[in-house]
Image (spheres, coloured by chain):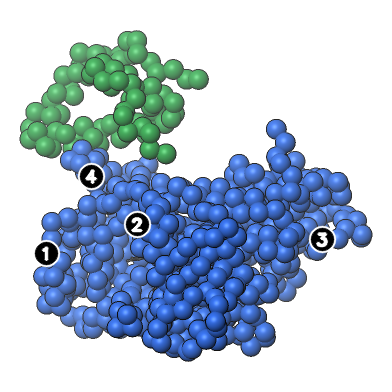
Chain colours: A green, B blue
Amino acid sequence: MVKLITTQNLSQPDDFYAELLENHNDLSTEDSHALNARLVLLLCNHIGDHEVLQQALAAARQSGGHSDLPSTASRQ
Amino acid sequence: MNASLRDRYDLAFTLYPYARSSDQDSASPVRHPVVIVGGGPVGLAAALDLGRMGVPVVVLDDHEGVGAGSRAICFAKRTLEICQRMEAAKPMLDKGIVWNIGKVFHDAGLLYEFNLLPEDGHRFPAFINLQQPYFEKFLYDAIRTEQAKGAPIQIRGKNRVDAMSTEADHSLLDISTPDGGYQIKADWIIACDGAGSPIRSMLGLDFEGRVFQDNFLIADVRMTAPFPTERWFWFEPHFKSGDSALLHKQPDDIWRIDFQLGWEIDREKELCPKNVRARVDAMLGPDIDYELVWTSIYTFQCRRMAKFRHENVIFAGDSAHQVSPFGARGANSGIQDVDNLCWKLKMVLDGSAPERLLDSYHTERAHGADENILNSTRSTDFITPKSDISKLFRNAVLSLSADHAFARPLVNSGRLSVPCVYDGSQLNTADALPDAPMRARPGAPCPDAPLGDGFVLDRLSKGFSLLGINTQIASDEPLHSISVTSKSAPDIAVRYLGDAQTGVYLIRPDQHVAGRWPTYDAQSISRALAMATAQEARDG
Ligand SMILES: Cc1cc2nc3c(=O)[nH]c(=O)nc-3n(C[C@H](O)[C@H](O)[C@H](O)COP(=O)(O)OP(=O)(O)OC[C@H]3O[C@@H](n4cnc5c(N)ncnc54)[C@H](O)[C@@H]3O)c2cc1C
């Protein structure tokens, strides 16, 4: 199984972070959310591997203090 | 009592006007082997299929023909193949409109287009568009043809089932007619009485699921407009006639238009012709002349019964399961129910299979219903996002899909009905030809392919069949057998052999694969046949 990389992998962490914020600077909150959604989809497609994406979803939930499975995961 | 037998809907075709039956004059209730409640598409198809096998059936419907209601328009390839098996498909194909191209728009822009790209060498296209009343009428015409040849099918119009009680080995039905009430007994009941199934209520059975909080205005309009024969779907259309909109051609210069109106609406106001026309005008532009043929507002739901068989009462079609129409899975899946059920019921009636064969009807078709519910729920969630965040992602997908191919498969304006594969069914024999294509694996419907002047599906028998490719089937094999070679039938070789050199397929009466092997072996075949007819418990 391919594992989600959760150790340092960004080549220029400070630059990346600054650019991420810069790209939101001129946007309303609503437009920012929309930009993030497009970004998530682009990156997910780049990753492609379904298991890695599942691990990423679980890791994102966990760090937010949510259980690692959504309560609606029971649907089929 | 008679006064209450008023029509609940207008008729498109009056086909079976009320006629008094001798059962109504009998001193004691007459007993029938099979009674079908409901003469919609599913009930008619069941009557046709059983009648052709010589099973006496009585269809009871509370109307005298086909409802004018504008409902199903897209009929899928598998439905047409099943109708072909019952010799009812030709007029459907002749009348229906074939389409392959779909276009998806967001606001004013074209996001992308798709082509159903049908593979060559099949009798039927991926889809035809045909008004549901025609579909039902053609099934009825096929019933008339069979009746003339002696098929024991009776259809009783204005016969409404009001009550049912179940005895040890039969049920007793209370029926209202314009002449008053009478009773009949039935060994088996097939409840094809639609989404609101009175039979289901009479048995006190549940029908749980999800209602989507949205209303859809359906308008069928007649116009001779220059729009192409394509499926056009808009998300958040620029003409503001709804949150989404659909334009799709039907025969007779009729176009299906539907608009997503939202949850909080005033139905009566929206249905008044002036308001409908305002929406249609905005969509078609000012210069297009049209006539409103039919309008209606629907809310959609996805749900199914926990069990499709309750002793001698079997549910089929909308009575057993309901889906939102995005993906055209309602009537199409109901026809697959019939296809699955009728041969099993016939074998049980003949005593050539045990009653538990009918339990596989539930297993296989509930699997189909779950697949349909899953797909149409996902489509509906995309079309009708149920939260701010799901709308956010939906629109992110839409805006990306204009520029990037990767986002297009995420756009979901309906995943169109494909036939169900009965993976994991207790009737399947484990795949002994794993190098052959997955599409013809045990549980799958046989792929069609040219054979001689016709098609392989035409050559299958009413019972079980064997198909041998590049290998001998013993001449004393009792089953109906077809032998071909890669040379004589190259498309069959591609679709049934793939990388395998030789193959033998055991095919059920509903044209689904029961088992497959590299070569013929009488013992394997007879064990698989026993499995496929529930004569033998599954080993392991
Ligand atoms: C807007 C819309 C679009 C759709 N589009 C598609 C599509 O493109 N493709 C597709 O495959 N499906 C589509 N569907 C679904 C399709 O219309 C249904 O799945 C189909 O009609 C179900 O057939 P049925 O025979 O099970 O039930 P019904 O068609 O509802 O028939 C039930 C019959 O039982 C009779 N009945 C009821 N109660 C009694 C009683 N007590 N006694 C005697 N008779 C009784 C009724 O009068 C009726 O004739 C669409 C549905 C809608 C609403």
Mark 4 close to ligand 1, CB under 8 Å: no
- Please tell me whether mark 1 sits on a helix, a strand or a loop: loop
Q: Where is mark 2, residue-wise?
A: B324
Q: Where is mark 1, residue-wise?
A: B266
> Foreground residue, B77 or B117?
B77
Which percent across, then down, holds residue B497? 73, 49
Question: Which mark, residue B479?
Answer: 3
- Same chain check for tags 2 and 1: yes
Badge 4, how many Cα within 10 Å: few under 14, some, many 20+? some
- Same chain check for tags 4 and 3: yes
Chain on which label 3 sits: B
Mark 1 close to ligand 1, CB under 8 Å: no
- Marks 1 and 4, the one that precedes in the sequence: 1
- Marks 2 and 4, the one that precedes in the sequence: 2
Q: Is residue B306 above or below residue B29?
A: above
Mark 2 close to ligand 1, CB under 8 Å: no
In this rendering, which labeled residue sits more in front, label 1 or label 4? Answer: 1
